[in-house]
Structures are given as structure tokens and as C-alpha cells.
Amino acid sequence: MAAEREPPPLGDGKPSDFEEQEEGEDLFTSTVSTLESIPSSPEPISLLAEDVSTNSNGPKPAEVVLDDDREDLFAEATEEVSLDSPEREPILSSEPSPAVTPVTPTTLIAPRIESKSMSAPVIFDRSREEIEEETNGDVFDIEIGVSDPEKVGDGMNAYMAYRVTTKTSLSMFSKSEFSVKRRFSDFLGLHSKLASKYLHVGYIVPPAPEKSIVGMTKVKVGKEDLSSTEFVEKRRAALERYLQRTVKHPTLLQDPDLRQFLESSELPRAVNTQALSGAGILRMVNKAADAVNKMTIKMNESDAWFEEKQQQFENLDQQLRKLHAHVEALVCHRKELSANTAAFAKSAAMLGNSEDHTALSRALSQLAEVEEKIDQLHQEQAFADFYLFSELLSDYIRLIAAVKGVFDHRMKCWQKWEDAQITLLKKRETEAKMMVANKPDKIQQAKNEIREEIEEWEAKVQQGERDFEQISKTIRKEVGRFEKERVKDFKTVIIKYLESLVQTQQQLIKYWEAFLPEAKAIA
Amino acid sequence: MMEGLDDGPDFLSEEDRGLKAINVDLQSDAALQVDISDALSERDKVKFTVHTKSSLPNFKQNEFSVVRQHEEFIWLHDSFVENEDYAGYIIPPAPPRPDFDASREKLQKLGEGEGSMTKEEFTKMKQELEAEYLAIFKKTVAMHEVFLCRVAAHPILRKDLNFHVFLEYNQDLSVRGKNKKEKLEDFFKNMVKSADGVIVSGVKDVDDFFEHERTFLLEYHNRVKDASAKSDRMTRSHKSAADDYNRIGSSLYALGTQDSTDICKFFLKVSELFDKTRKIEARVSADEDLKLSDLLKYYLRESQAAKDLLYRRSRSLVDYENANKALDKARAKNKDVLQAEMSQQLCCQKFEKISESAKQELIDFKTRRVAAFRKNLVELAELELKHAKGNLQLLQNCLAVLNGDT
């Protein structure tokens, strides 16, 4: 029953040592027979009757930190599906979140998991991925396109509808290719749902594109000019990138809200994404409160990894912002260059017209044509500058903000745990005091009360610890994944950008080679 | 020849080639050769060392040098303009005043902002600005030189006494810049002149050649002005974009040195690429400036000088016609006939002299112009090609390395 080796803390009676055990995973290198409460961290304070024996397989949710040896999970088929999800709910959703709980996915894949004992969500996550890989045998294959922006409606109630096309071979979708119409607030709604479910457990949820009141108003009013077309294109591209990033995340891909977003033809309107709605204002208030809280939380960082990573992300953020500013300047100057080249082309044409030497006149006209073509080139290059390079950087600046948010959530989680411990301590002190004071008539009832409270808080403390370790683990994994994605992303996009530069130069060569004989022909 | 990557000695030779090409036939005469062998930039003035080599008997030596400042060049030019004898020639346009203000301002701003950037960034920007300063400096030297060469090449102007004094007299010419009063006088003179020019241009010319030239020059001058301004703006945008490459390269470098993942090598390589490609882009901008903008600017000034010539001719024509009328009146009244006759003779002579030389001058102007444009446009195209090919090579090499790594 018990694992082959003895978990060190057992029987130690170790005092409340809440350091997160970094080698938690190493404890479980061998098979894990039953997923019972093998505490990876030292025993909770409770030295009382509740026996934290490894063999308890009662309703008490086990704190399990699994290793990566997944096969063994499936090997044992002893326990049933944990029913403690409802219990965990209130603790998990500490932020205002809609009705959908993080645990919904369980029900979807529950049928496959009877054979396993699931007591902690960590198993869910892991197993979900494993299941996908194992039973579906799918390669991660899904392509998303956002296209065909269409204006719907009139005046201030008008909006742009975008076509979202999905091509996939994943079996969790009913068709292999389908498309739906979505508007911008739908995307924001999707993000808001995903964020509320996953952000506070440590998943890096890609941020949605930003709202722009000015941009949208122009479009609504119906200005058909260059800037509003550009705005719509910019938004379309941003939405596409947003969806692509979101589906790349294996956990988010499984989310039913995401699936609904991609598949169902009718989507309930997400009204609380509007800036001035009640929910919007609530969001702003929460944000402010969060900012204040962040400043007051002093966390005992026991894990250098987190501190290091936070510092790294801080640095990266600064560097990216600087680079982004420079690239934006480049875009601006290139657009200027394009405009000036066009103006010069016209002027050169005029000059050629008034020149009375025929050959020179012709050459000048040719020069004007070359410059006009070059102006086009500059424009295209400016687009590449922007859509490839500049947008990549701004996407990552926002992503890093999301990463920082996740780290903040971990701090908050720690704070909760800490608070729970403090409260438990106080309750115990109260109990102890009660024991000493001798008032027989009140004592029994009060004693029971306080006993109950202590039990409650012990549970909370344990939960808090588990949550904290959970979120820490998730973050580690997420950060690893994020870094890999980041490296891939940057490399791909920058190479594409350099290729655009190559093209520009090749075109330039062609144009000037065509002009040279004309210039030489001036007699 | 790694021309694109070195802003140093290369620059001067191209400058010289570039601007001298504006007047192609200048070096052909051994009798009188003038150049600016050296120049010194002090706080707010530039001192040019004018070096002359001549076999003409007028000079005491065969080879000598003097130091001149910008005001002295202007004095020389103005003395030509005011000389009635030269009314029939296109006076070579005066060189523009050396203007380092913008560059100096930038250097100052850089000095102030030193604290806010990294050491590498600061050094890079300082080099950039110093190169800019140097470029402006070289350009002004070249323009002063072209002026002198044009004068030296002109069969009549080269014999001018003031010119010889300018070349030889090795003391200060005591030519001070115009003070406020004189500048105001100049301003009024110009106003009168342009008003007069309008009146005078109303007179239709009998001679087809001049009539055609007048219409042509008017239109041409305006369009060259426009083209010159637009070309200027274009080259400046180009330079701004090149400067941005510089900063992007620095940022990428910083990213590369600080990143913890294996992307840092990638960033460093791309940063290097941007640095190199920026040098090429800066060269492109500089060459465009030289071959196109400067060409247009020069011909803006020359076409103005040609217009001035036409104005002087029209003026003398009007004077001639007025003298005719006066003579008729005098003959009618039989009073001061001799005087009127003499004055009419003078005017006639003057007019004919001007017309004759003007015709030749204008024909020469056209020849020079066509040749200069040809040379510069060909060189422009060749340089653009060279730089684009260099750029392409750089980019492709970099891409090969990056793709090989990933």
C-alpha cells in the first residue's frame, strides 16, 4: 500500500515548516502505487487525532505531487473519481469569477478516468494531456484564421464582424473545417472567461488585443479612409494572433468555452466586456485594489527560481519596450520616406517635362517612374516593419504583463495560506486559553465550537499549502513552455522579417538596373 | 572595396568627384588651376586654404596659397555681379554659407543626454553625429571649391583683377560681412530688381532664341526648386530610417546579452546585421544627397544666375528702346541730339554685346547641365545598385547563418 520508500516527513512530527519542498518530485521517482496522501511537504501542524498516515484514503484530499512518470498512474486502478471538486471550489475561485468553475473539464473526460484516483487538480491537468496524446493519438494540429472584416449595422451601434475559420484534425471538434462570425467583444468575452478560470491557478493566458475607442468610432461613423482600413486590418491581424496563441496552449485548448467560441454559430453577447458596464467598473476597482495589495504583500520567497525569473521578466519587459519604441520610430520614418519619395517622383516628372533636351527629359521621366516604384516598395516594407516586427514586440510586452500577473497570483495564494496559518494559530491559542480558564458551564459548548473552527482552519491551511504548491508547479511548467514558445516565435518572425528586407533589396536592384541604361543613354 | 562600410577617406574623394562633375570641363586648363587644399573649422567660421597653380604671367609665383573665409568668397561674387562688363555672362552662383548650427545643436543635446543611455549607445551616437558634422564640413568645402573652379574656367572672369587679388593677396582682404544697414539695402535692391524684372519680362523679345530661353528658364527654375526641396526631404527621411536601424541594433544587442535562453545568440547576430545594414543605408542616403539633392540644388542656383543674365539683357533692351525713343524726341525737338545719339549708341552697343555673350553662355549652360545630369544620374544608379547588392549579400548571409542555427 504505502510506497516502497518512506516519505521522510512521516512520523517526524515536524513542526509547521512551510517551505516548499523543491525536491518534491524526486521523492516519487519510483512507482506511485496509490495516490494517497503522501505529503511531499512536511506534515501540517495538526498533531491531533487526525492521523496523516499515508494510508488514509478517506475523503481527505490527498496532497500529491506527482512525478513525471506517468505510465504508473494508469497502472494502478484502485480508487474512484474524486468527488471533492465541489469542496475545492470556494477556495480556488478567490476572484470574482463566473459560474463556470475550473473543474468543469473533469466531467468531460471523466468517463475515461474511472480507473484513476483523482484527488488533486494537478492530476487532471496532467492526465488530460496524457489522455489526449495517448488515446487520441493526435498530433497538435489546429489552424485558425481571422478574415473578412464586415461592417454590420449603422451609426454608433455598428460593429465589425470577423470570420473565424478553424481547420483541424483534432477529434474533439465535430468537424474538420468550420467557420463562424464573431465580433470584437466576443473575443474579449472569451479572454475574460479563460482568464477567470486559469489565471489564478498559474496558467499564462494570452491577453486579448486592446480596445480602441477612437479607432472604432471612426469605423462606426463610416469613414472609409486609409486610417480606418488600417485600423481594421491591424485589429484583424491581432485577433488572429491572439487565437493562434490561445489554441497553442494545451490546457486552454481543452476548455469548452474556447470550443464554443470556435464552433457554435450563436454566441451569447458578452456585455460585461464593455468599459462602462457594471462589470467593467468592478474590474477597474479590482485592479486598483490589486495594485495596492501587491505593494503590501511581503512574501518570504523560499524559492530562488521564482525570484530569478521575476527579475528576468522585468528586464525582458524593459528591453522589449525600448526595442518596440525604436521599431515604431522606424515604421514612422519609413512611411515618411515613402511619402517623400512619391512627392519627389512627381516633382522629377515635372522637371523632366520642362527639360528641353530630349534625352535628358526622357531620363528624368524614367527616374520619376523608378522613384514611384521605390515608393511602393517602401510602403510595403513599412507594413512588414509593422505587422511582423512591431506587433510581435507589442504582443510580447502584453504577454509578459500576463506572466507578471501570474506571479502576482502566486503571491496572493501565498498570502492566503499565510493568513490561514495565522488564523489557525489564533484559534489554537484561544482553545488553549479556554482549557486553562475553568468555566465548566460554558466550556463544553465553546470547546466544541472552537474545535470545529480549528478543524476548519486546519483544512484551510492544508488547502492553502496545496494551492500554493500547485500554483508554483504550474507556473514553473508554464514559464518553461512560455520561454520555448517565445524563442520559437521570435526566431520565426524575425526570420520572416529579414526575408522581407531581402525582397525589398532584390526589387531595388531590379529597378535600378532597368534605369541605368536610360541614364547612360543621355547624349 | 568596402566603400559602404567606411565613412572615412572615401567620402572626400566621392565628394570631390561628385561636385566637380557638376561642371565637367573644369580641370582641362593648365593655365590656371585652383583648388581648396585644406580647411579648418573654428568656432563659428571656416577657414579655407585656397591653393593656386598658374602659368599666367599676372601672378608673382607659379604656385601659392592663401587663407580665405566665406565672406571673402561672397565679396568676390558680388563684385562680379556689380561689374557692368560682366552683365552678359552667367555669374557662377555663390557658395552657400557654411551651416553647422543643426549639427552642433545635436552634438550638444547628445552631451546633455549622456547620462540616460548606455556607454555603447552613447559612443555610437557620438560617432554618428561626428560623421554628420564631417560630411557637412566636406560639402561646404567642395561647394566653395566649385565656385572658384567655375570662375577659373571662365575665359573672361578668370582675368578679373579682383579674382587675382583674391587668389594671391595673402593678407586679410578686410572684407567684413554686411552689417544690418547694408543687408537692408540689399533687401530693397532685390525687391526693386524683382519688380523691375516683372515689368521687363513683359516686353516680348524679338529674338526667338531668347524668348524660348526665357520661358524655359522660368519654368525650369521653379521645377528644379521643387525637385530640390523634395529630394532633400527624401534623403533626410532615408537618413532617419538608417539612424533607427542603429538604435534597433543597440536594443537587440542589449536583449542578446541579457537573455537567458538560447535566443541570445540569435539576437546578437541580428543586432550585428542591423549595425552593418545601417551603415549601408546611411551611405545610400549620403549618396542620394550628393548625386541628386546637391545636383538639383546647384542647378537651382545656376538657373537663377541664368535668369539674372536674361534679366540684365532685357533691362538693357528696354534701356535701348528708351534711348531710341529719347533720340527720336530729341530729333523732333532738335535739342541735345548729339547727347541722345551717343547715349543711344552706348545702349545699342551694350545690348548687342550682352546678347551675343548671353547666347553663348546659355548654350554652354545647357551643355554643362546635360553633361552634369548624365554623369550624376549614372553614378547615382550605379551606387544604388552597389549598395542594394551589398545589402542583399549581408541579409542573405545572415539568414543563412540564422536558419542554419535553428
Image (cartoon, coloured by chain):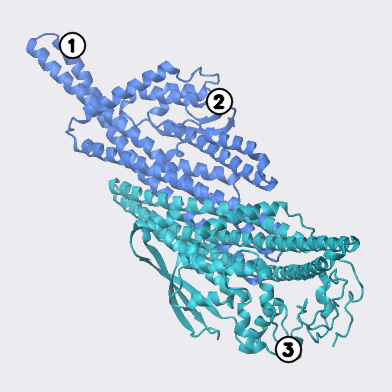
User: Of the residues shown, which amino acid type is indicated by label 1?
Assistant: Gln
> Foreground: B259 or A496?
B259
Give the residue number, with chain letter if any, for mark 2: B66
> Foreground: B284 or B270?
B270
The location of residue B303, given as percent across then percent down, is: 34, 36
> Foreground: B396 or A319?
A319
Residue A121 can be seen in this image: yes
Task: Tell whether label 3 touches label 1 (CB within 8 Å).
Answer: no
**Disc on res. A4:** none
Q: Which chain is cyan?
A: A
Q: Residue furthest front?
A: A441
User: How many residues crowd mark 1 within 10 Å: few (<14), some (14–19), many (20+)?
Assistant: few
Q: Which chain is blue?
A: B
The answer to which quarter of the image holds residue B206 is top left
| Callout 1: SS | helix
Residue that appears at 51% across and 51% down: B284
> Foreground: A191 or B349?
A191
User: Of the residues shown, which amino acid type is indicated by label 3?
Assistant: Phe
- Using the numbered discs, state the Cα–Cα distance from disc 2 to disc 3 in whole angstroms: 98 Å
Q: Is residue A2 left or right of residue B163?
A: right
Give the residue number, with chain letter if any, for mark 1: B339
A369 lies above or below A452? above
Quick one: quadrant of the N terminus of chain B?
Answer: bottom right
Residue that appears at 89% across and 83% down: A5
A292 lies above or below A78? above
The location of residue A56, given as percent across then percent down, is: 82, 82
Give the residue number, with chain letter if any, for mark 3: A74
The location of residue B393, given as percent across then percent down, is: 56, 63
Residue B357 can be seen in this image: no
Q: Is residue B363 left or right of residue A160?
A: left
Q: Nearer the viewer, mark 1 or mark 3?
A: 3
The answer to which quarter of the image holds residue B132 is top right
